[in-house]
Amino acid sequence: MKWIALLCCFCCPAGAESWTNALGRLPLPENTVLSRDNFIPAVLTAFQSNATVGGIVFLPAVSDDFYLVNRDKTKLNLRAPDIACAITGLTHATEVRATFSQGILFLHLARETVEPRVVIKHETTAAALTNAIGHGRVLWVDRHWKTVQPEIKALLNCEVLPKAASESAWHFARVNLAVCGVSQRQLLEAIVLSTGSQLTIERHRARFVRANR
């Protein structure tokens, strides 16, 4: 099958740098051919700290589309030198959309909202979440809640529910995200969107539950 070669050139708008320019400086390994099988890990692993884009988050419908719905379809066979070209190629070849909001790039389908469901029941705890996560990079690729929850707890230094082995987390989507230099609140909201959950911030506690659809 003929490979799709992508030649991307993005211009900086006046003022703030665009996400395409920022991610255009983050290369993918040479000769990488992207398909539904390797697109998510390739892009997330290649993401590094920069001044414009704090993270990349894949929402559940995208991974479902890649690994379940369209897994037997023709391979994408996208070739791109950098993350920006890869994402642009993906949005042209599939129904995946890219939305840049509050310093985070979200990859999602049209039916998915990029507004995290968050309920605040303790303002002081919520206010403290403006602090940086204190970690160079968080990279979670196809991670189940039972392995992510202990790491969230360590990063936030507060109680995180449901617990790692809880049955109430069985229907959370697997986490696919990479972030650098974001606040604790941004990390929590990224997790909400990647897991298809909603969050309640309580006193010294972050409680995730499956979102109603």
Image (cartoon, rainbow, N blue to C red):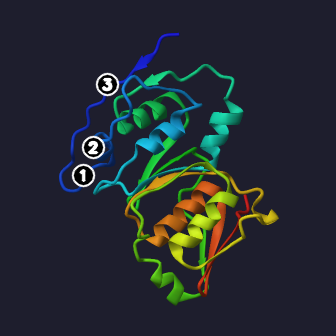
Q: Could you tell me how far apart the alpha carbons at marks 1 and 3 are, in whole angstroms?
A: 20 Å
Which badge, 1 or 3, comes first in the chain's sequence? Answer: 3
Q: Position of residue 21 (x, y in %)?
A: 27, 43
The reply to whether the C-beta atoms of the residues labelled 1 and 3 are less than 8 Å apart is no
The amino acid type of the residue labelled 2 equals Asn
Q: Is residue 170 above or below residue 19?
A: below
Please, which residue is most extreme toward the top here? 1
When asked about the image quadrant of residue 82, the answer is top left
Which residue is at 39% across, 58% downward?
A: 180
Residue farthest to the right, as pictured? 167
Q: Which residue is mark 3?
A: 7
Q: In which quadrant will I find the C terminus?
A: bottom right
Q: Are marks 2 and 1 in contact (CB under 8 Å)?
A: yes
Residue 17 horizontal/vertical position (percent): 24, 52
Please tell me whether mark 1 sits on a helix, a strand or a loop.
loop
- Looking at the rendered structure, the secondary structure element under dot 3 is loop
Residue holding disc 2: 21
The residue that label 1 is drawn on is 17
Would you place residue 77 above or below residue 143 in this image? above
- Which of the 4 quarters of the picture holds residue 164? bottom right
Q: Nearer the viewer, residue 101 or 82?
A: 82
